[in-house]
Image (cartoon, helix red, strand yellow):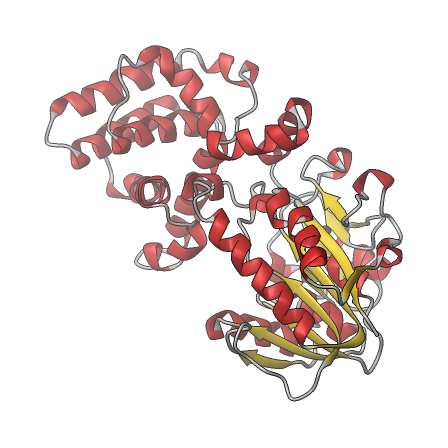
Amino acid sequence: MAEDALTARRAALGLLLRVTEDRRLMSDLLPGALQDLAPEDRARAQRLALTVLRWMDRADRMLGPFLKARPQPAVLHLLRLGLVEMAVDGAAPHGVVDSAVSLARERSDSARAAGLVNAVLRRVAGRLGQWDGLPVPRLPKWLRKRLLAVYGKAAVEAMEAAHAAGAPLDLTAREDAAAVAAQVGGVVLPTGSVRLAAARQVSALPGYAAGDWWVQDAAAALPARVLAPRPGERVLDLCAAPGGKTLQLAAAGAAVTALDISAKRLERLAENLARTRMAADCIAADALHWTPAAPFDAVLLDAPCTATGTIRRHPDLPYAKDGTELAALADLQAALIDRAAGVLRPGGRLVYCTCSLLPEEGEAQVAAALKRRSDLAPDPAALDLPGIEPAWRGEAGLRLRTDYWADRGGMDGFFVASLRKAA
């Protein structure tokens, strides 16, 4: 087996083990885990790992009848990787099986592991026609159970279908969405974002170098639109990186302060500000301990969360997490809401949002904040935006789900609430 044929698969196997066994997010592993690979191998390894994670539940259903016991993690991932390559990518079974057997020999001193991989993959290779008839991949139990309790079986199955389908490319225009759509060959969505149906190399798209737009999911673009900044207003983007919302605020003419605890993540924001020829005061600091010189007219708080609304883009997420971080995140979110309210002038506006499907990080947080703080009140009129559908509206704010707009390619899961501080 030629080394070139093994390089990307070996790296993909390593990524899968780090995600599922070490509970590491792919974004934390890259690019460091693949830095020694050639660009084409790096891209292929990442794509292979993400494809396996997206289809892992279906792969396990198909592999199950051929396994008397659950193999060691590395062997099981080799089986998943081989099956997904054949069933999803259409790779030739002979080459896939040979590569998987070679990698099994590398990972184990036992010939039994290589024999198992060889036998199982050869058997499933003859049954690839069954793949498309298997159920849509289910979410891991820790998350599926929570979502079932909130949304019910039909909605959760629709969300899982959206996760399996992946996500289109959405752009936010600096000025004219229709012009950007014409430029890149996309369509303008009802809420104003531009959507491209097929994945494209972002930096090669027309208007990228000129800073005419930036990448931002249609759902992620709504919180800044709810805030509705006005020219000259002092606006704080709390937990700002990677910066799509900061760019929206700056494009509206606000005087923006972008605060984030990560100086490294702010570097990317600064690059996008330079590309789009806009300005913001970027500050690396802990929001819980940072004090501004004067109160702000408006604050946008995109709080740290489980990010369960982004699984269609990040299929590693439900496997790298297990729900145990939820309590600590909820405490942090509550503290950040109080901090945001504290730096807001009387009569000022606060938009709280999370890219989460879990009410603990959305509706429940707002309800608790309103009980805790007599100086905050809901501002439902701010949610009356073009393109907002009635089903998205709740008592506490907008509840956006991954199965919404299924005929258009879906959207990320988000919760968005608008609050106003007493004058």
Identify the residue at horizontal 62%, vertical 46% (top origin): 199
Q: On the picture, is 136 further left or further right than 383?
A: left
Q: On the picture, is 20 further left or further right than 50?
A: left
Residue 301, image x and y in percent? 66, 64
Residue 240 sits above or below residue 18 on the image = below
Q: How many marks?
A: 0
Q: On the picture, is 134 further left or further right than 71?
A: right
Question: Which of the image's four quarters has the N terminus?
Answer: top left
Residue 86 sits above or below residue 397 on the image = above
Residue 183 visible in the snapshot: yes
- Looking at the picture, tell me which residue is in the foreground, 266 or 2: 266
Identify the residue at horizontal 70%, vertical 67% (top origin): 300
Residue 43, image x and y in percent? 44, 50
Residue 121 image-quadrant placement: top left
Residue 324 image-quadrant placement: top left
Residue 169, image x and y in percent? 67, 49
Question: Which of the image's four quarters has the C terminus?
Answer: bottom right
Q: On the picture, is 191 further left or further right than 327?
A: right
- Looking at the picture, tell me which residue is in the foreground, 347 or 418: 347
Residue 222 visible in the snapshot: no
Residue 247 sits above or below residue 282 on the image = above
- Looking at the picture, tell me which residue is in the foreground, 364 or 408: 364
Residue 185 sits above or below residue 243 on the image = above
Identify the residue at horizontal 17%, vertical 31% (top origin): 105
Residue 405 image-quadrant placement: top right
Q: Residue furthest left?
A: 109
Residue 185, image x and y in percent? 77, 51
